Amino acid sequence: MSTTYVIGTAGHVDHGKSTLVERLTGIDPDRLAEEKEREMTIDLGFAWLTLPGGQPVGIVDVPGHRDFIENMLAGVGGIDAALFVVAADEGVMPQTREHLAILDLLAVQGGVVALTKVDLVEDDEWLELVIAEVEEVMAGTVLGGAPIVPVSARTGEGLEALVAALDEALGQRPPRPDLGRPRLPIDRVFSMSGFGTVVTGTLVDGSIAVGDQVEIQPGGLKARVRGVQSHKTTLEVAWPGSRVALNLAGVDVADLKRGEVVAAPGTLAGSTLIDVHFRHLPDAGRPLKHNAEVKCFVGAAEVVAHVRLLGVQQLAPGESGWLQLRLSQPVALDKGDRFILRYPSPGQTIGGGEVVDAHPPHRWRRFKPDIIERLETLAAGTPDELVEQALDASVAGLSVAELAGQTSMSQDEAAQALDVLLDEGRALLVGDDRVFSRGAWGRVTTAMRQVLTTYHADYPLRAGMPREELRSRIRLDARVFTAVVDTAVRLGDVAIEGGGSWLRLPEHEIVLTGAQQAQADALLGTFAANPTAPPSLKEAAAQVGDEMLQMLLTRGDLTAVSNDVVFESGVYREMVEVVRAHLAEHGSITVAQARDVFGTSRKYVLALLEHLDQIGITKRVGDERVLGRAGQDG
Ligand code: GDP
C-alpha cells in the first residue's frame, strides 16, 4: 500500500528552503507561485519527492516573502514531519526559534534538520558549534533529538543522506486516520482554463472522491468534486494525509478564499467563539492580557481575535491557561485543532494550543471555577470520548472486555459509553463482538480500498483481488477479516466477485481500451472462424496475453473445458445441447461418434466429454458415455 505523507519546510528566511526543495524535487515552488498568479499553469503543483522506496512525499514549501511566518502557518497544518532548515554559515536566527516554537505548538510529529549551505563553511569547528547550538534549541521540542544532516543545495553534498533521514523519520509514522469526515483546509484557490475552480490543501480525517458533494465552510457553499489530483496524478480518490488539488464544480473562484475548509456536508460549521487551552511561550516578552487583540491561525485560516482570559488576571510568559477567543469572522474548526496566536504588529508569535470546544454556548464569566472544571473535563475527555479514543487507536477493533481493560473502566461503564457511540453512529458493530470506531473503521476500509485501488490499477482486466491476498496485505486475522469484509460489503465499501473469492472496489469495472477491444475481437474472430476446432489456451494466451485471456474466461466469453481446450461460450453451450440430444435419441455416444457429429478432431471431443463427465452431464461406461446425474435435468 502506498501511504502518502506530507512534509513542510520551516526555517529562517534565506536559509535555503526553496533552493533545497527545488534541488530535492526538481520543482521550483516560487515558479509555481508565479504561474499560479498568472493563472496559466496546468501543473497543479506542489513539490514532491520520491523516497528510495518509491513513495511520493508532498512538500509544502509555502513561498512568498511577504510575511513568511504567516505564510508558513497556512501550509504547515496537517504535515507529517518538518524539514527544518538552518543555514550552516549563519546558524540559529530569530525565525529559527520562532518556527521551531510553532512546530512545537502545532504538535508536528518531529522531522529532520537540513543544515544547508555547508559549502560556505570551511571551518569544521564552526560546523560543530552550529550543530551543538541547533541541538540545544531543539531539545525539549518536537524536534528534540531529530537528525541533523549537513547539506549543500549548490554542490549536492549530503542530499542523499537527507532523503534517507526523511525516509526513516516518515517510516515511523502511522498512516493518517480516515475518520470518515474529510476536511481540506484551502491554502490556494485559483482558476484554470478549461477546468474552472481549483483549490489545494492537505487533506485530513477522510477521503474525497470524484463525484462527491462537498460543502465549503464557513458559509456552507455547496460544490461537487469534478476532479482530484495529487502529485500531478489524476485520481479517483484522494486519501487522508496527502497534498490534494480539487477541481470544484458549482462555485466561483471569487466565492472562495484561503482558510476556508472543504468538508463533507453537515460535518463542520463556522464558529466565532472558541474555548482553548493555551501555552504562552517563555520568550513572549510580556504577560498576555484580557481583551488583547491577537491574530489567530488555525488550519489555513488567519483571523483577528480578542482574548478572554479565564480564571486568571493575566498570563505570564511560560504559563499555560484557558482562553475563550472571540473571532472577528467565523472560522470552520473542530475540537482538537491546533492554533497559534501572534501579536499583529510588530508580528510576533506568542503561543498556541488546542481547541477544547469549537462551539461553546456563550461567553463565559471570567472567574467561575465550574467553567474551568468544565474545560478541564472537556480537555481530558468524557467516557464516550475515552472509549472512542481507545477504539481509534486499535487496529482491528476491540471487544467490550478489551475496551474496559484499555480505558481502566469497568465493563459496565465501558458498555454504557459504547452505547452512546453506537447510538450516535460514532462506532460500529462488526461481526458478533467487535466494535470499531468510525476512525478505526475508516482506517481499515481505507487500507482495503487502497490495496484494491493499486490492484485494479496493476490488473485492470481482473474482476477482483483474491480474498486471501487482500487479507495478508492488510494483516488481519481470518476471523476478524471475515467480519470486516461482510460489514464492508454490506456498507458498500467493497464488493465481492466470483461468489466471494475475489474482492473489488464497488466502482471497479473492466474497461477495455480501444486497442484491447480490437485484440479481444480479433481473438474471438478466430474462435468464430473455427468454432469446434479453435485455438488452444496456449495459443490464445500467446495471441492476447494471459491477463486478457483470463478476463475473457472470467467474463464468460470463453469456456475452458481442459487446461488446453477452450471454446467460445455460445459454441460450448450448443455442443452440450447436441450431446444431450444425441444421448436422448441414442442413449449413448462414443468419442468417434462425437467427433463425426462435430466434424472436428479427437483432441477437442475427448476434452469436452471428459469435462462433461466431470460436471456430471455424462457418465463414462467403458468406451461410451451415457446420461449422467446432472444431465437428466435441464
Ligand atoms: P529561503 O528563503 O529559505 O527559501 O531561501 P532560498 O532558497 O531562497 O535561498 C536563499 C539564498 O541562499 C539564495 O541566494 C540561494 O541561492 C542561496 N543558497 C541556497 N542554498 C544554498 C547552498 O546550499 N549553498 C550556497 N552557497 N547558497 C545557497
Image (cartoon, grey):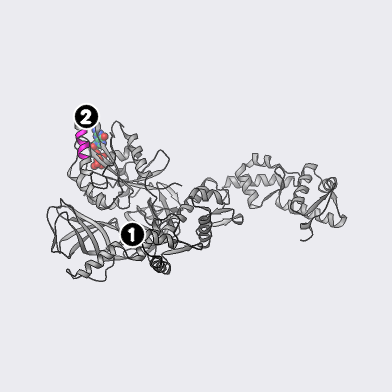
Left/right placement of residue 616 relative to residue 444 reads right
Name the quadrant containing residue 397.
bottom left
Closer to us: 25 or 382? 382
Residue located at (40% from left, 48% from top): 4
Task: Give the residue number, with chain letter if any, for mark 1.
Answer: 261
Label 2 C-beta lies within 8 Å of the nearest ligand 1 atom: no
Mark 2 Cα-neighbour bin, 10 Å: few <14, some 14–19, many ≥20: few
The magenta region covers 127-134
Vertical position of residue 570 compared to residue 220: above or below: above
Vertical position of residue 282 compared to residue 93: above or below: below
Farthest residue to the left: give it: 286
Task: Give the residue number, with chain letter if any, for mark 2.
Answer: 124
Inspect the image, locate mark 2, and give the three-letter code of the amino acid beneath it: Asp
Farthest residue to the right: give it: 586
Inspect the image, locate mark 1, and give the three-letter code of the amino acid beneath it: Val
Q: Position of residue 626 (x, y in %)?
A: 83, 53
Q: Position of residue 524 (x, y in %)?
A: 68, 47
Mark 1 Cα-neighbour bin, 10 Å: few <14, some 14–19, many ≥20: many
Left/right placement of residue 29 relative to residue 563 reads left
Is-magenta flag for residue 128? Answer: yes
Residue located at (61% from left, 56% from top): 499
